[in-house]
Image: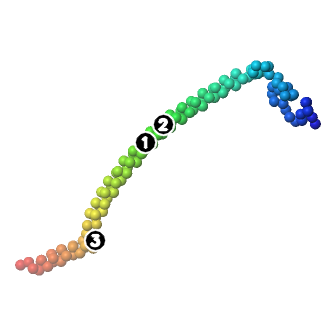
Amino acid sequence: MSGRGGQPSNIIGFPGTDGRGGSSFPPGGGGPYDPSMEARVAALEASLGRIELGINTSAQLLAGVQKDLGDVKKDVSDVRKELTEQGKAFSRLDGRVGALPTTLQMIGFVLAVLALAGLGRYLAP
């Protein structure tokens, strides 16, 4: 199962070689002309242009998001200040409500006033 030059037949030579270790390229570093190379390079350059445009667009969007995030941080700070002020106001209100008489105390007061009024009727000349 030997191919050319003693190599196994299942090995394919590298393009540009003659199968015996030599090169089929002309001397001086130039290679065979590939007519599709220019079209492929142009397609790659166009793709690169679209990638750069996408990166620039993403960078602009990211800048906008960073600005919005700064605004959100400021808003959260303002909300915290307002909640602190409302908490202080609520604690003052809670203290005032705690000083109000209970329902039982109010009923007792009303009964005491009625009792005094009834007694006052008997004590009046």
Q: Amino acid at mark 2?
A: Ala
Q: Where does residue 122 sit, x and y in percent of width and height?
A: 11, 80
Q: Residue at x 34, y 51 (%)?
A: 82
Q: Where does residue 109 sit, x and y in percent of width and height?
A: 21, 73
Viewer-side residue, 9 vs 19: 19
Residue that numbered label 1 is attached to: 70
Q: Quadrant of residue 73?
A: top left
Distance, label 1 to label 3, CA atoms, is: 51 Å
Q: Amino acid at mark 1?
A: Gly
Q: Residue at x 18, y 77 (%)?
A: 115
Q: Is residue 109 left or right of residue 68?
A: left
Q: Residue furthest right?
A: 1
What secondary structure is marked by label 1?
A: helix
Q: Is residue 2 left or right of residue 116?
A: right
Compared to residue 12, the image places residue 118 above or below, namely below
Dot 1 crowding, Cα within 10 Å, few <14, some 14–19, many 20+: few
Distance, label 3 to label 2, CA atoms, is: 61 Å
What secondary structure is marked by label 3?
A: helix
Residue 63: give its label.
Answer: 2
Residue that numbered label 3 is attached to: 103
